[in-house]
């Protein structure tokens, strides 16, 4: 696991954008296209803006979300809105965006359409940039959630999973570990002293396998997918 620490958010955002863009260029040169998944929240905004300025053939890039609140893309809390406003601009305006939210009334109703769209448009996810909450969640894998077992079931086969008991916005769709476990490279991006303290608890050797309590441990306790940490010092 690569652990990169930066003195401030600006330098972190710029370096993460440059490092991911370099990998994306290599993927396009090798395979003709690249598929990435990004997270919502406030933390990745500076990174999104830095990535949007990177020079690469954006028309060969597919961008999707790690998870999404089941709200329309013009509503508060929409990760699609966040990505459209901050990433799919400047040079990145030519990228193709694949949302997780569809017109179904609930994520349970919209599950099969979302699952089918992912399979139609993605062969394999190349890169995913995940965040971490103060409760130890990542994606919409929340501690004690009724959806957690399904979301973390690597052998389950589903690429997405409806969540109906998340905090703040209960109704969500999330990518699953079954899908992310096939990714070529994962990034975990978090900032601030509070998140650093959470990370110390997350990586406690005595608790690292307790995925239910802090589901972000799923990506930290595995060795199948290369993982890079980007965090402030």
Image (cartoon, helix red, strand yellow):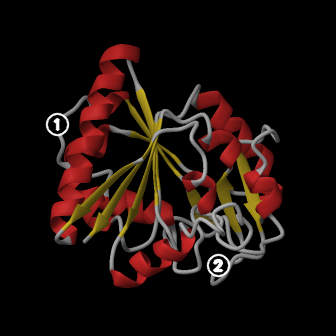
Spatial CA distance of label 2 from label 1 is 35 Å
Pointer 2 residue: 169
Query: In this rendering, is residue 110 above or below 97?
Result: below
- Residue at x 30%, y 38% (from the top left corner): 94
Query: Where is residue 164, by image quadrant?
Result: bottom right
Q: In the rendering, at what x and y percent does residue 30 appear?
A: 35, 15
* Callout 2–callout 1 Cβ contact below 8 Å: no
Q: Is residue 189 left or right of residue 89?
A: right
- Residue at x 18%, y 43% (from the top left corner): 54
Pointer 1 residue: 55
| Tag shown at residue 206 | none
The secondary structure type at the circle numbered 2 is loop
Q: Is residue 102 visible?
A: no
Q: In the rendering, at what x and y percent does residue 67 appear?
A: 58, 59
Q: Is residue 67 visible?
A: yes
The secondary structure type at the circle numbered 1 is loop
């Amino acid at each position: 696991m690569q652990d990169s620490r930066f003195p401030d958010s600006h330098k972190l955002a710029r370096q993460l954008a440059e490092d991911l863009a370099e990998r994306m260029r290599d993927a396009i040169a090798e395979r003709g296209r690249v598929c990435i998944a990004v997270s919502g929240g406030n933390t990745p905004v500076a990174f999104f803006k830095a990535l949007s300025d990177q020079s690469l053939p954006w028309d060969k890039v597919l961008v999707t979300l790690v998870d999404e609140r089941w709200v329309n893309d013009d509503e508060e809390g929409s990760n699609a809105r966040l990505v459209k406003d901050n990433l799919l601009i400047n040079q990145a305006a030519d990228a193709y965006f694949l949302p997780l939210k569809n017109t179904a009334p609930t994520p349970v109703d919209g599950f099969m359409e979302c699952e089918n769209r992912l399979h139609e448009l993605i062969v394999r996810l190349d890169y995913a940039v995940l965040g971490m909450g103060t409760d130890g969640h990542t994606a919409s894998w929340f501690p004690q959630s009724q959806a957690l077992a399904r979301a973390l079931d690597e052998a389950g086969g589903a690429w997405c999973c409806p969540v109906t008991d998340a905090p703040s916005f209960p109704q969500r769709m999330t990518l699953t570990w079954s899908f992310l476990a096939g990714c070529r490279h994962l990034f975990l991006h978090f900032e601030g002293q509070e998140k650093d303290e959470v990370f110390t608890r997350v990586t406690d050797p005595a608790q690292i396998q307790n995925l239910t309590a802090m589901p972000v441990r799923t990506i930290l306790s595995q060795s199948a997918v290369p993982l890079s940490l980007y965090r402030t010092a």
